[in-house]
Each structure stands twice: as C-alpha cells, then as structure tokens.
Image: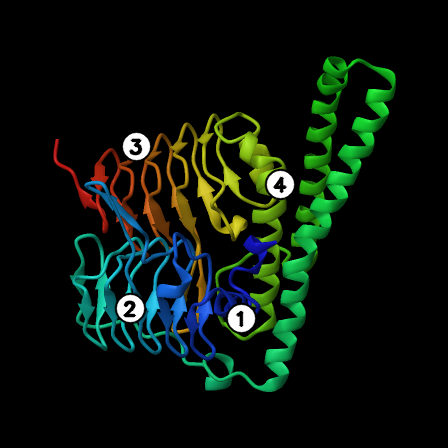
Amino acid sequence: MTNSLYATLYLAPFLRLLGAKIGRLAEISTLSHVTPDLLAIEDESFVADIAHVGPAVIADGYFTLAAVRVGRRSFIGNAALVPGNTKIGDNTLIGVLSVPPEQKVPADTTWLGSPPLCLPEREQSETFPEHLTFAPTRTLYLGRLGYEYFRVTLPATFAYAGSVVLFLSAYILLAGFSIPMAALLLAPVGLLVGLALTLLVAAIKKLLIGTYQPKVRPMWSPFVWRSELVTALYENIVVPWLLAGLTGTPFMAPLLRLFGARIGHRCFMETTFLTEFDLVEVGDDCAVGPACSLQTHLFEDRVMKMSRLRIGNRCSVGPRSVILYDSTLEDGVILDGLSLVMKGETLSGTSHWQGSPARRKEA
C-alpha cells in the first residue's frame, strides 16, 4: 500500500504524520532512504522518482543522519542524490542522476551530473496556464484526488484477489496431495495468476491510454493522471507478481511487447523500469542491465514531456544507467553503469561511454 501512495496527493499528509515538513502543493514521488524528521520540502517543490534525499552514511564505525532542506519551487531529478546537511535554494534544479555541488546550493541555479556542472540556462517548457501547473483549481484538485484514490487502492485490490486465488488453490491442493506435491503444483498456479493479472493491467492500459505517442501535457490534466494510474498498476502488480521473477530470461521481452514496447530478438532485459512502453525501441542482441531506466518522460516545470528513445542492435547498457527521451544509441554502443544519456543525444555506433552525463571513453 505504501508504494502505491508515491507520487499522489495522499503522500504528503502521510509523510507529515511521520514527522517530515512538507510544504503546500509539494510533489513527491518515490523517495528513497529518507529520514522524515530531518526532511523539509518547501512549497511547490518537486522530488522525482528514486531520488535519495538525506540517506544515512555508514562509515568508520559511525551511523550518521543529517537534515536536508529543499527550497521553494525547486526540483530534485530522478535518481539524484542529495546528501545530509544539504540546503537547496529556491527555484533550483538538481538534474537526473546528479548530485548538488556543495552543502549550500545557491537559489536560481541548475546542476547536472556527478560531479555536477552548472548550466547557465534552463530549457524553457511549453507555457501552460498557472492553474494547470502550480495553482490548480478546486475542481482539478478534487478530480486528481478521485483518480489517485483508484491509483492507491486498485493495486492492493488486485493483489488481494490474487492472494485469495492462491490461498484457495493451496487449500484444495493440500486436501488431496502431500505438502511437497502441493507446493510443486501450486507453483504453476502462481504463475498463471501473475499472468492473468498482467493481462488485466495490459487491458487497462489499452483502455485508458491506447498507444503512447510523443506528447506535452501539464501535470494537472487527466491524461497525466491516467498515465500515472497505469504506471502504478504496472509497478505494483505486474512487476512483483510476474516480471520480477522473469528478468534476464527469454520470457521478459514478449511480456514487455504485450504493453507496446518494441524489443528485438535475443535481448537480455534485466530491468523493469519502463513507463511509456510504446515509446521504447530496443534492437536485436542487446543487453540492458538491472535497474536501468529507459526514461521516456520527464516533468519539467510541472509539464510532462514524453517522447521516443531508441537503442540499436548489439548494445550493452550497464546497471542503473538512465537513458532520456529523444536519445539514440546506435549499433554496438557500450554504456557503463550509472551513466546518463542526455535527452536528444545520439551515441555513435561501436563506441564506449561512461559517466553522468555520459562521456566517450577512449580505448
């Protein structure tokens, strides 16, 4: 249930109950390794997926916790790391897979990479009215609460239904077989339940979204809420009930194709981090390592931008790398782990890259 609260309006009150200081209309996604009592996020800030904010440091026999403050209208990108004792100024951006430059980050600055580079200008997003980005109307607020009620409850409901089927199956099998034989027969039942739930989520994706296309939409819009609902069902039902046990196997690609991803032949897929499936293309004979994020969308100034990304044939993508939308890896590219491919970037064929942002590695 807690995981399905992430990136919803229901998360901020929950974090406040745990002791965090969360400002008005702050957006918080999947925070990692956070200490709520030491966390302060000011009004209208945004913390994106898998951001590590104030994680504990264990070194030299000591366990150290320290406070973190994120200023007003600041943005912490996907998989960014904000160490303890850091104060992020107002209207500041820490990019994807990036770290802040120092413990006190100046206001109105933009930082990208590890080690971080200061970007003199931030790309401007398509302009939308303020009530669709930072200042929603009461109608929009209530509408999103309604969508996100189902986002929070549907994964738990589906998981409960699947658990009931498994429990009843186990009860029936134990009545007629020995414990070892019942356990052996229950395994394919569990696989079938996971497959049935996966097909159900794929049908819901088709019903709510259809086929993902490159789009630009403000955060306070029904399309974004529907997309986030599909993502929540995928991450909380499809992944734990089926895909998590099939990563790195030949069964992974057909299941991702079921959602619309274009995965080539003989691919080794060890990641489940896809969201807008139809925008992902992976060529033949590729290896995509664990926890790689094929990031086909970003929220920029509370505007959701999504577009395609392409990985060519015979590419290797290392663990926990991030590939942003509108980027291309040409045939034969090797991307080391924990590397970031910038949006709109093309990595030339038969080359080796590493780092955040990725730099060409000379032989």
Mark 3 crowdedness (10 Å alpha carbons): few <14, some 14-19, many ≥20: many
Nearer-N-terminus badge (3/4)? 4
Q: Which mark is residue 332?
A: 3
Q: For marks 3 and 4, give the one nearer the viewer.
A: 4
Query: Of the residues tagged 3 and 2, which is closer to the observer?
Result: 2
Calculate the distance from the C-alpha at mark 2 to the C-alpha at mark 4. Answer: 36 Å
Instruction: Give how far across and how far down residue 96 sits, in percent.
Output: 32, 57
Regarding residue 27, the answer to whether it shows in the image is yes
- Between discs 4 and 1, the one toward the N terminus: 1
Q: Determine the CA span between mark 3 and mark 2.
A: 33 Å
Residue 206 shows in the view: no
Residue lying farthest left? Answer: 362
Figure check: 52 above or below 8: above
How many residues crowd around disc 2 within 10 Å: few (fewer than 14), some, or many (20 or more)?
Answer: many
Q: Residues within 10 Å of mark 4 (few under 14, many from 20)?
A: some
Q: CA distance from mark 1 to mark 2?
A: 24 Å
Q: Quadrant of residue 121?
A: bottom left
Circles 3 and 1, Cβ within 8 Å, touching? The answer is no
Label 1 vs 2, first from the N-terminus: 1
* Pointer 3 or 1: first along the chain: 1
Q: Position of residue 9 (x, y in %)?
A: 55, 70
- From the image, state whether disc 1 or disc 2 is nearer to you: 1
Residue at the front extreme?
61
Residue on which the image places disc 1: 13
